[in-house]
Amino acid sequence: MTPMHGRANAWFHAALAELTATTLVTSRGRKAREILHVVTRLPDARQRVLTVPWRRWNPFWAVAEQVWILAGSRDAAWITAYNSRLRDYLDSVDAEAFHGAYGDRLRHGPRDQLRDVQRQLQDDPGSRRAVATIHDPARDNPEVPTNDRPCNCALAYHLREGALWAATFNRSNDFVLGLTGINLVQFTAIQEFLAASLGAAPGPYTHFSASLHLYDDDPIAFRLLSHADEAYTFDVYAHVEPTPMRPWQYPEEGWTTITKLYNGLALDAEACPYWRSAGAMLAAWAVLKRGELAEAMAHLATMAAEDWLIAALEYVHRWAWNRKRLAEFDAAYETIHPRWDARRARYLTDYIVHDVADLESQP
């Protein structure tokens, strides 16, 4: 497979088509199309928001994952509130924690590995020792039965010329739900978070997929392929710029911010605009789950991060369509879209509202 470089929104369809053309393999009773040893590189790690038409991504979950991992949590109730399908990976219906939670393994093992990466690069900016491991032989061997064996195994960081480069090694990568569904978001967010702690910019992000695969029965892939001849593509970064995580203003700023977000506390007006936008999305999700559409839209209207805002609005529009509440959505949207000039607003609005003709009962 040709290495995938650039923005995920640009190479997504080509990669999907290439995977679809491969032969089937069977693993644990499930058939998939597979390509071994694939390299994916994002030159700009900040461009992490996926806006693929008909993908029907949940950006609220993607933001929550960033907070959940950086907080070092393995709490099942916290993260499944954003994506109930994650319960399928719990080892029992009453389990309170995930076996393979990345944040727990990165921050609450024998060492807080993310803080160790910080210290390593602060003490020796040219270091090649700034690594963190997720795979644990004691917990991830064949004798330990679990539904939640980590797919991502190890992380490496290099600080060069004021930019933090990052690489992730993944043993088994589902293209739809793994690589493009959440992995690129999870690990570029960690990369940028660590870069901000060091007063650096995020450099390129590289993801090694030992097995990149597409399940033959994947309903999302089927839907995307069924629309393949409609020639509608959209890249949010053709219209808006990503909002960066700013360098930390004091030594513990990032950790304090994550703790507040994880505990449902509001950030003050001087907090990092990226994380304030994340907080607005978490607050919007909480009220949307209670059916309070106007209040959810009011939270979203405060966001500085326009790439995440566009993804959130596309999701909420589907939510409103399913519940026959489009008039409420439209009224609230009227207060948001004037922030864009007429040309951008047309393209952005087309993406937000295009995908409702064949929706199922849930967004």
Image (cartoon, helix red, strand yellow):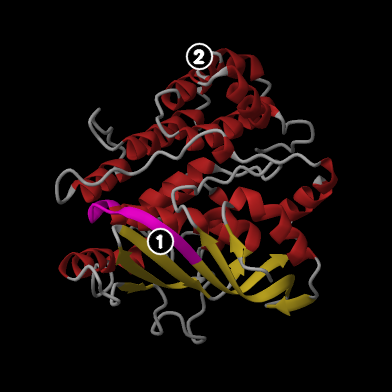
Along the viewing direction, whichever of 263 and 300 lies nearer the viewer: 300
**Residue underneath mark 1:** 97
In this view of the protein, can residue 37 be seen by the observer? yes
Whichever of callouts 2 and 1 sits on the residue coming sooner in the sequence is 1
Residue type highlighted by circle 2 = Thr
- Residue 256 in percent (x, y) is at 21, 46
Residue 102 belongs to the span the image colors magenta: no
Residue 199 belongs to the span the image colors magenta: yes
Is residue 230 shown above or below 40? above
Question: In which quarter of the view is residue 282 placed?
Answer: top left
- Residue 329 in percent (x, y) is at 59, 19
- Measured in 3D between alpha carbons, the distance from the residue under mark 2 to the one under mark 1, in whole angstroms, is 40 Å
Along the viewing direction, whichever of 347 and 131 lies nearer the viewer: 347
User: Callout 2: helix, strand or loop?
Assistant: loop
| The magenta segment | 196-206
- Residue 84 in percent (x, y) is at 54, 49
Proximity of marks 2 and 1: CB atoms separated by less than 8 Å: no
User: Residue at coordinates 81% horizontally, 48% vertically from top-left?
Assistant: 228
**Residue underneath mark 2:** 335
Along the viewing direction, whichever of 236 and 137 lies nearer the viewer: 236
User: Callout 1: helix, strand or loop?
Assistant: loop
Label 1 Cα crowd, 10 Å radius (few <14 / some 14-19 / many 20+): some
